[in-house]
Each structure stands twice: as structure tokens, then as C-alpha cells.
Image (spheres, rainbow, N blue to C red):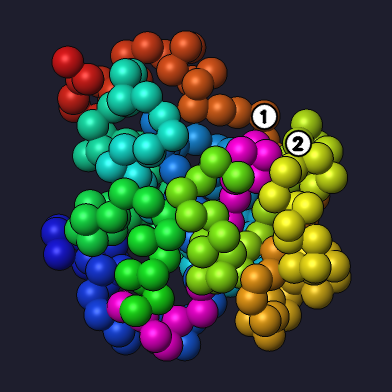
Amino acid sequence: MGTDPVSGSVALRNAARWRGKRVGLLGGSFNPAHRGHVHISEEAIKRLGLDAVWWLVSPQNPLKSAEGMAPQAIRLASARAIARNPRIVPTDVERKLGTQYTVDTLKALVALHPGTRFIWLMGGDNLQGFHRWHQWRQIVRAVPIAVLLRPRYSEARRSARVLGPLKKALKPDRTAPRWTEWALPALVCLEQPGVDESSTALRKQQPDWTDAYGHTTK
């Protein structure tokens, strides 16, 4: 399962460490990981009453170009370096599972951990493009979804295309702590201060950011 026992237990069937836990799942390229990822995770832990947030560092996001994408090992290293909160668990479980699409990852994790309650976490930018995700209708039937909206994306809770079909699935903010009681599909939008930082901006500021992890993209 690799050298990290915590990350390895994510891919271990019915691992005792996660049995009975409430776990948020935050997928992404993490190219590189940054304070915004930490902030959204800590907000989710607080507002949803989570025991942990797993960062699913994608081998390759099918909606993003491979150009400029650092190797997964480097992106995972950047995630582990910034995720100092012990409740945040960076992992390469998608590589271990051999899954590319979120829907397949969710189905695999739910099967691996029948005693764990999962909720998918995303930002407002992802909600706006959620209709382009592979089998998104199956995703919303696999686990509940919590959207953490930064101020610049607060309009997404009204403008996102998927919110038409999911109108009846949208839950009031005040019910968020009781998400394990929701019948699927279920989605909640939580506005929060946010951190104005992005992987794109960091790459522009530090084109050689991968060197900090002893590697280059070349």
C-alpha cells in the first residue's frame, strides 16, 4: 500500500481506522496543493462535523490538459507538505484503484469502506462545470455533495446548470451537520470566506515549484 500507512489504509478494504467515520472527499489535480485546499477542507470539517478529509490527488483529471501537469508523485508530495492538519489525508488512492472518473472512484471507495460515511466536497467553480463531469447523475446518487462557495463563486448556487435538475435535492444550509440523514440525491451549498489562492497563480509565480520536492517536470 506504499510507505504511508495512513494513505495506504484508504485503499485497504474496511480499514479499522475509518470504520464508523464521517469522511469528506476532495478530488483534484493539486498542481500544486495550496492554502485554499487546506481552508476548504477545514471549513468542511467544522461545518459538516467530519472526522477527516481525504485529498484524492488525481493521476490525470480527464477535463484538464496533461500539458503543464506535474507527475502525480510530485503533486502528492506538495499536498503532504501543506496538509499539516492530521485530519487532512492526501492520498493517491485513484492510482491504487485504477480509476479515472469520480463516479468510479466513489463506487470503489463505498464498496471498500461499507462502514464509512462519505460526502463529496467541491468548490463553486467545479459546481458550475459539474454538468460536464462523466456520469454526474450517478455521482449525486453515490454520496451527498457539499459545495463550499468562495465569495467570487457565490452566484454558482443560482446559476449552475445542474441545479435545475437537482432543485429538489438542494438542502438548506442549516441542515448540513445532519448530512448523514439525507436521502440521495442530496446537495448543500455553504458560503464561506475562502482563500484567494489558486494552483494556476502559484505556477505562474513559481514556474519551478516542483524543484522544492526534489524533482522537475522534465
Q: Position of residue 149 (x, y in %)?
A: 73, 45
Q: Quadrant of the C terminus?
A: top left
Marks 1 and 2, how far apart at CA: 12 Å
Q: Earlier in the sequence, mark 1 or mark 2?
A: 2
Q: Is residue 36 visible?
A: yes
Range drawn in magenta: 112-130
Residue 136 — which label? none
Residue at left offset 36%, top offset 46%: 57
Q: Which residue is the site of mark 2? A: 153
For residue 17, above or below residue 146: below
Q: Amino acid at mark 2?
A: Tyr
Residue at left offset 78%, top offset 31%: 152
Residue at left offset 51%, top offset 79%: 117
Q: Position of residue 47 (x, y in %)?
A: 72, 65
Q: Which residue is the site of mark 1? A: 196
Is 55 magenta? The answer is no
